[in-house]
Image (cartoon, helix red, strand yellow):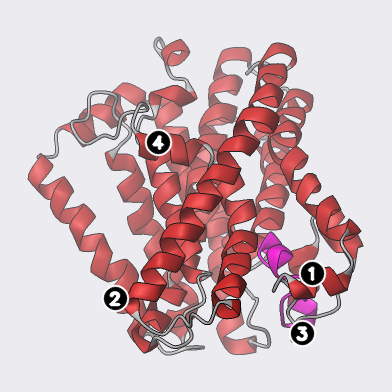
Amino acid sequence: MGNLELMTKKYFHTLDALRFFSFLLVFLQHVPAFGISWYSNINHWGANGVNFFFILSGFLISFLLVQEKLQNNSINLKSFFLRRMLRIWPIYYLLLIIFFILPVGIINKMGLYNQFGYKHEWIYSFTFLENYKAISMNKLTSITPLSMNWSLCVEEHFYLLFPLLIKFVPVKRIPIFLAGIFSISFLVKIAAYFFHHTDFISTELISCLDLFSMGALLGYLVAIKNQRISSIILAVPSFYKWAFIIGIIPLTFIAQNFIIKNTMLYFLYPTIQGVFFTLLLAIFIPQGSKLKISSENILSYFGKISYGLYLFHITIVNIIYLIFLMLGFHVDNFATLFILIILSLTLTIAVSHLSFVFIEKPIFRMKEKYFPK
């Protein structure tokens, strides 16, 4: 515990870059390329990015909460919730209000209306309950940019529940608590195999708690035994770390294309994946690790603005795709697909940068001033 004051979020040098890579998986999933058969395999990768986001959230939130509890013997829930609100709500609600004001006809002309989705009811978006509406309807909302809000809903539910529980669980019993919520989530996924009735079974908190809890366990261990954990990781030769990192690629991206839908493995595969993602995260924990991406690296900056990237990208991708069609360009070959990806990603980064500079950053400063960690 002697070096806890040195363990701030900035210490985790590579995590922002990893967050950006996770966003890229989600981004590629949402690039429409219906005329390219091989690209359909990539459309499954977005879920991997979301799974990593959940593990990363579990890690960071657990680390911060456990660290605070060790230092102060308590957790300031008011400060925690206000910090989360100031981080997530401003541009989230800005996006909601924009699409709330826009007439459906204009949304449709922008290529952002899905006629096969359910009629959007704003109460679910404004109260972070969109995921439960999707589960009940077994499809996504008709307004395309809001169709991915289910993951933000899950994150919000985790932020609401987890600190409340950690506050009252003794520090020494936190691993038992995490094992408990992992087991509950695991059993829910097994039950989903036998009683499966919706394609959105993994879009609510309980079935995602296995991912959050794995990341949270790593965060707990780093908070209480940083030097011990770091020394163990640093003792592993770089060759084996690189072999593990490279080996995750076929496990994550190739193997899952052969998993038959609605089989037991189909429901448990995210959990298996989560174990490897957590180990991947652990590799980059030690401050003295040779495997790192500096905070000064452009990829790390993209990771810092990844929340904006996540919120804005699907709108930008769909608008540019519609412009392509209007100009007579069909995304049915690699060259056109590549141009669509580059243009969409570049514009998404530009918009997210502006959002970060003019909206998020000023709020960060206010957050640090009035609600410090």
Is residue 343 shown to the viewer in this render?
yes
User: Is the residue under label 3 in contact with that under label 4 (CB below 8 Å)?
Assistant: no
Q: Which residue is mark 3?
A: 115
Q: Which residue is mark 1?
A: 107
Sequence-wise, which precedes: disc 1 or disc 3? 1
Outermost residue on the front side: it is 327
Which quadrant would the C terminus be assigned to in this image? top right
Say what amino acid the circle numbered 2 marks.
Answer: Ile
Q: Which numbered disc covers residue 300?
A: 4
Q: Residues within 10 Å of mark 2 (few under 14, many from 20)?
A: some
- Which sits in the foreground, 251 or 305? 305
Q: Position of residue 22 (x, y in %)?
A: 44, 54
Is 154 positioned to the left or the right of 104 in the image?
Answer: left
Say what amino acid the circle numbered 1 marks.
Answer: Ile
Identify which residue is drawn at 23% across, 24% down: 288
- The answer to whether residue 373 is above or below residue 159 is above
| Disc nearest the viewer among 2 and 4 | 4
Q: Position of residue 155 (x, y in %)?
A: 65, 51
Magenta span of residues: 135-150
Q: Is residue 144 magenta?
A: yes
Is 324 positioned to the left or the right of 302 in the image?
Answer: right
